[in-house]
Image: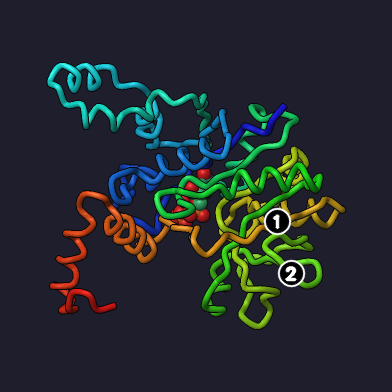
């Protein structure tokens, strides 16, 4: 059977985005016109995913409502002839099957993935973080490439990585330890190092929110002790799979498919500006506004 199942963890507390996330999920924050999680689902769907399990939590029910059909709104738009707005709801009827389960204690990303085990069972699956968009307007086939690589190389773990321009940033991410020299965009993974110091970092490749796992990850997650911040770290379980001889593959994100991390204000603001500037209707006007505001002559770079 084709690998068409993804687990999307959306249960985190989003404390770095308070107060914006006090009573709404960070995954529902808008980036340009759409909430973050809509881009994530769109990207997965384009990559052939047909079943999505959201791992949600307290205060996250707006995500469920969002992907449901709002019949009242549809009728209202239809009867008032608002065809353009109606077209914006077409995603409600896409062919993806949604399921929801809840993480009742926020014990970290690894724990959130483990919550999916009874649903996933003994089959490979994708994990896509609900707070990260890959590619401008989610135009990325990275998950499709990862699935192909998973099947081709008979891997247990496939991780997508973003090349950090500034090596000092390694301290904030899980970093790839490749096996030997990297010669292309796809490489073998020896291990991962969580938030290393600049001197200890084995590369400048940071884990970028998309994974493919064999079910072997679950038995390691079950054994993973709580680590930093009392959380069960997904990275720890991945390292164990690799240590025990599981095959790991890393794939580098192409430069034209950057990761937009909505987990902190700095990168959220940047993502919003990027998406708003490329809006077909309002992007040009926004650019004129920003140039005026920043006193940049039109046409200047
Ligand atoms: P983060 O690592 O950004 O954690 O989550 P967080 O708790 O949401 O945010 P901060 O650190 O408090 O600001 C990455 C992804 O994993 C999910 C989040 O919802 C997000 O999509 N997650 C994280 C869970 O589902 N459960 C958790 O316990 C932690």
Q: Nearer the viewer, residue 248 or 226?
A: 248
Secondary structure of the residue carrying tag 1 is helix
**What residue do we see at 73% from left, 45% from top?**
150
Residue 42: x and y in percent read 45, 39
Q: Nearer the viewer, residue 148 or 12?
A: 148
Which part of the image, by quadrant, shows the C terminus? bottom left
The answer to whether any part of residue 106 appears in the image is: no
Is 248 situated above or below 53? Answer: below
Q: Quadrant of residue 267?
A: bottom left
**What residue do we see at 80% from left, 55% from top?**
242
The answer to whether any part of residue 29 appears in the image is: yes
Q: Label 2 crowding class (10 Å Cα cut-off): few <14, some 14-19, many 20+?
A: few
Q: Quadrant of residue 228?
A: bottom right
Q: Is 4 on the left or on the right of 151, as rendered?
A: left
Write down the residue under mark 2. Answer: 183
**What residue do we see at 70% from left, 63% from top?**
192
Residue 234: x and y in percent read 65, 51
Find out if the beta carbon at label 1 lies less than 8 Å from the nearest ligand 1 atom.
no
Q: Is 94 on the left or on the right of 70, as rendered?
A: right
Give whichever of discs 1 and 2 has the lower sequence position.
2
């Amino acid at each position: 059977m084709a690998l068409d199942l993804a687990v999307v963890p959306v249960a985190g507390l989003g404390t770095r985005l308070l107060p914006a996330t006090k009573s709404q999920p960070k995954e529902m924050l808008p980036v340009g016109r759409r909430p973050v999680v809509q881009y994530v689902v769109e990207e997965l769907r384009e990559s052939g995913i047909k079943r999505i399990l959201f791992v949600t939590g307290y205060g996250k029910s707006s995500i469920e409502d969002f992907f449901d059909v709002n019949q009242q709104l549809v009728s209202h738009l239809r009867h008032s002839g608002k065809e353009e707005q109606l077209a914006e709801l077409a995603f409600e009827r896409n062919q993806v099957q949604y399921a929801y389960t809840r993480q009742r204690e926020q014990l970290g990303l690894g724990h959130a993935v483990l919550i999916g085990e009874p649903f996933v069972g003994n089959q490979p699956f994708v994990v896509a973080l609900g707070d990260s968009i890959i590619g401008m307007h989610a135009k990325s086939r990275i998950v499709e490439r990862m699935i192909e690589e998973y099947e081709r190389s008979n891997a247990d773990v496939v991780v997508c990585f973003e090349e950090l321009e500034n090596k000092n940033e390694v301290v904030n991410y899980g970093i790839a330890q490749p096996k030997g020299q990297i010669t292309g965009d796809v490489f073998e993974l020896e291990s991962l190092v969580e938030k290393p110091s600049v001197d200890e970092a084995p590369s400048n490749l940071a884990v970028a929110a998309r994974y493919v796992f064999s079910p072997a990850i679950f038995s390691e997650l079950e054994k993973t002790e709580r680590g930093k911040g009392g959380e069960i770290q997904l990275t720890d379980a991945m390292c164990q799979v690799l240590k025990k001889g599981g095959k790991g593959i890393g794939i580098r994100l192409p430069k034209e498919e950057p990761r937009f991390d909505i987990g902190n204000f700095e990168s959220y603001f940047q993502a919003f500006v990027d998406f708003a500037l490329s809006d077909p209707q309002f992007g040009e006007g926004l650019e004129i506004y920003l140039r005026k505001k920043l006193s940049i002559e039109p046409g200047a770079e």
